[in-house]
Image: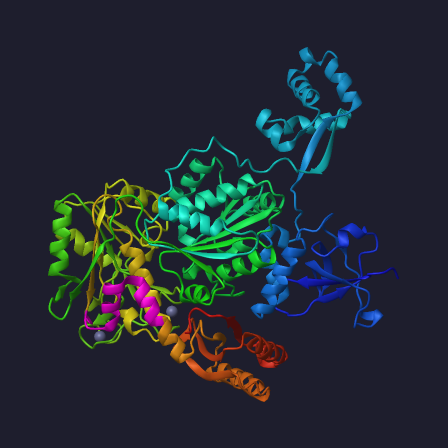
Amino acid sequence: MTECCILRVAVNAPLSQLFDYRPPPDASPDALRPGCRVSVPFGRRRECAMIVELGDSSELPATKLKFAHAALDDEPLLNDADLWLVRFVSDYYQHPIGEAVAAALPALLRQGKPLYPVVEHISLTNEGANAAAGELTTKAPRQAAFLHRLRERGGLTGAALDDAMPGWKRLRKNLLAKGWIRIAEMQDTAGDIACRTATPQHGPALNADQSAALQAISNGAGFTVSLLDGVTGSGKTEVYLRLIDDAIRQGRQVLVLVPEIGLTPQFVARLELRLGIAPLLMHSGLGDNVRLAAWRAARDGSAPLILGTRSAVFVPLRNPGLIIVDEEHDSSFKQQEGLRYSARDLAVARGKKLDMPVVLGSATPSLESLQRCSEGHYRRVVLPVRAGKAVPPLLRLVDLAAHPVTDGLSAPILAAMKRNLADGGQVLVFLNRRGFAPTLICQGCGAIAECGRCDARMTVHAGSNRLQCHHCGAVRALDPKCGECGGAVVPLGQGTERLEETLNAHFGDCRIVRIDSDSTRMKGSMDKALALATAGESQILVGTQMLSKGHHFPNLTLVVVINADQGLFSTDFRGTERLAQSLIQVAGRAGREQRQGEVIIQTAFAAHPFWAELLRGGYERVARAALEERELCAWPPFSRLALLRAAAAAKVDAHRFLDSARRIAVALHADEVRILGPVSAPMERRAGRYRAQLLFQSRDRQLLHQVLHSVRSKLERDPLSRRIRWSIDVDPIELF
Ligand SMILES: [Zn+2]
Ligand SMILES: [Zn+2]
C-alpha cells in the first residue's frame, strides 16, 4: 500500500474516537487531505465524515478496515487552524469530536452536499449556433429569441434563464431533441454575496477617553485580549468601528459576536452606514442555503465583516484580523445543550491560536474577565463617562415594607411614572417573567395547577387562555373550575401580560407596548415594537430582559424594576453578579440624551447589603465584593468547575450512574479535585425525567481535565450510559 493510506475521520455521532478507513480507490490525494469530507460506511448507514488526520497504520486488523465510499471535496473545507479549533473544543469540553466538527459546518455540508451549489448550465451546440443564425426568426420566434440569448451570453445557468426568459423550460425538451442545446452540471462559484455597499460616512470625532481606549487596544501586534469596560452610552461602538475599519483597511477580516438578541436592525444599519460594508450576518434564523453562502464568503475571504451570534465563533476566516465579543458577560454566549461551549472563551482561544487581537466589551464585565485583568492576562481599558452630555441615571429603591403594592405596583412607582409621563418622558417597566401570572390557585381547596411532567407550576397565559409550563413547553386549556373540588380558580402573582393590563387601567390614554418572547413571536413584530418605542410613539414599554439589552430609546427617562428580589437569594453563586448585570443593563436604557434618567427598584429587602453596594458603588463595587466572596469560597474564577448531569425516567438510574462516576473519580486519587454529590437537581423532575448531578471543582485545570477524561471514557463503556441522558458541562454558568 502507498504511504499515508489510512484516513482518520470524525463521524457525526456521540462517540469520542476517530474511525479508520482506507481511502476510496479512485480518489486523488488532494481530496484526501485533513479537512476534506468523505462518505463512509458506518454501521448499516452511509455517513458523511471529515478527515481529521492521516496515518500509515491502523490498530484495526487489515480485514476489518473498510474502504471509504467516495471523496466529497476537491480541497479541504477546514484548514489546519480550523481543525485545531475543532480538536480543542472536543478536548476542552469533553465532547465527541464528530459533534465538534458538526458545530463548525453549516447543515448542508454536514449532510454531504457540495461546497458550491451544483447548477444547470445551458449552452448552444454547433448545430444550435447555426440554427440561431438561420431563418428561425419568422417560423419560431420564441425559439429564435432563446437561441439568440444563449449565443449572446455564451450560455446561461437555469436560474439566470428563469429570470431572463420565464417559460424557457417548455422549449427545453424540443431543443435538446434537435441537438441544438446542451445542458451540463457545474459548480456555481459566481460571487455569492456583495458586501461593499456605499461610501462610508464619517463618524463623530472621538472624545479623549475613546481615543485613549483606541490607542491602548491597538497598541502592539499579534494576540492580545482587551476588556473594553464602558458604561452604557460611553461610546464603545465608536471604538469598535475604528478598530474594524483599521483591520479591514489592512485587508483583514473582522468577526463580531453579539448576544442572541443583539442583532438589531439598528446596530446592523449603523455598521453598514459607517463602514460602507454590509456585514455578513450569521445566526440561527438563516435558511440552509443562505447560511452556506455566508459560510463560503467568510471562508474564501470575500466578506470583510462577519456579524453573528454564538455559533459564528466557528466560522472559518481566510484573513483573520480581529474578533470582537460585544456584551461579553451575556449568558447567551454559552451553549446550554449538546456541545456546551462558551463562544467568548473560544474567541479568546482562537485569537491566541491565530495570533490576533481579541476585544471583549461590556458595561458589566463578567467576574471571570475582570479577574483575568487583575492577573495581567487581559488589559482593562475603561471608558468612564457617557459620551456627549448625558449623565448617569439616578438609582433609588422603593421599600415594599413601607409601601404596599396593588397589582404589583407601589404608590411611589405610580407617582414617578405620572410625573415622567406628564413631562413628555417615556417609561420602561421591567419584569423578568412572561405570561399573565406565575401561579393558578383554587380559592376553594388551595390546589395549585402544576405541570404533569415537571416539578413546576403552570404559568397562566390569559391572551391564549391557556396554562403553559415554561420548563418543558407543555400546554393545556385554562379551566375556570378547579379539577379537584370544582371551586373557582384565580391567577396569583404578576407576569408581563398582567402588568400590561394593570398599566392600561392606570394610564389608559398612553400607548403601551409589551416586548417579551410571547408578544414578539410573529416575524417582524419585534422590529415593529422597537420602532414604535424608539420613535417615542409608545409612552410605556413593558417587558422582560429582551428589552434590557442594546436598544437605544432616546426619549426614555424612567426605568421601573418591579421585582428584583429573586436574584438576591439565588442558590447559584452567580446570583448577585447576574442581578447586578441585569439591573445595570436595564438602567442603562434611561436618560441617554440630554436629560438625567431615573431608575426605581421595588424590593421587599431594602436592608440587604447588595443594595448598599449597588447604590453607592455601582457595578464596580458589587463586582469587587462578589470577587472577594468567591475567592474565600474558592468558586470560579478562583477555581474551575465541571458538572456531570444525568436524567432518567427512573430516579434510581440517574443516581446509580452518578454514583459510579463518583467511584471512578475517587479511585484516581486526584486529591486536588473536589467531588460534590451526587445530588438531585433542585427541580428534580423535568419533562418527565428525574435529574441529578455531580460537581467537580479544582484550582488545577489540567488535573480537572485529566479526571474528566478518565471518568468520561469509563462512563462511555457503562451500559447504563446508553439508557439515560447525561452530559458533561465544563465551566458551567448555571449550576442547577
Ligand atoms: Zn379546588
Ligand atoms: Zn413541564
Residue 591 location, x and y as percent? Answer: 24, 48
Q: How is the image coloured?
A: rainbow
Give the image quarter of residue 664: bottom right
Q: Residue at x 14, y 65 (%)?
A: 405
Which sits in the foreground, 44 or 282? Answer: 282
Image side of residue 267 versus residue 558, left or right = right
Residue 471 location, x and y as percent? Answer: 38, 67
Residue 704 location, x and y as percent? Answer: 55, 77
User: Does 620 appear in magenta?
Assistant: yes
Label total for image: 0
Quadrant occupied by the C terminus: bottom left
Which sits in the foreground, 640 or 529? Answer: 640
Rendered position, 638 above or below 181: below
User: Does 245 appear in magenta?
Assistant: no
Q: Residue at x 53, y 55 (%)?
A: 313
Image side of residue 614 versus residue 61, left or right = left
Tell me which image quadrant ligand 1 sits in. bottom left
Residue 66 location, x and y as percent? Answer: 79, 64
Mostly what secondary structure, the magenta segment? helix
The answer to whether residue 451 is visible is no
Q: Residue at x 53, y 72 (%)?
A: 727
Q: Residue at x 28, y 51 (%)?
A: 589
Which sits in the foreground, 138 or 688? Answer: 688
The answer to whether residue 698 is visible is yes
- Which span is picked out in magenta? 604-626
Quadrant occupied by the N terminus: bottom right
Which sits in the foreground, 621 or 595? Answer: 621
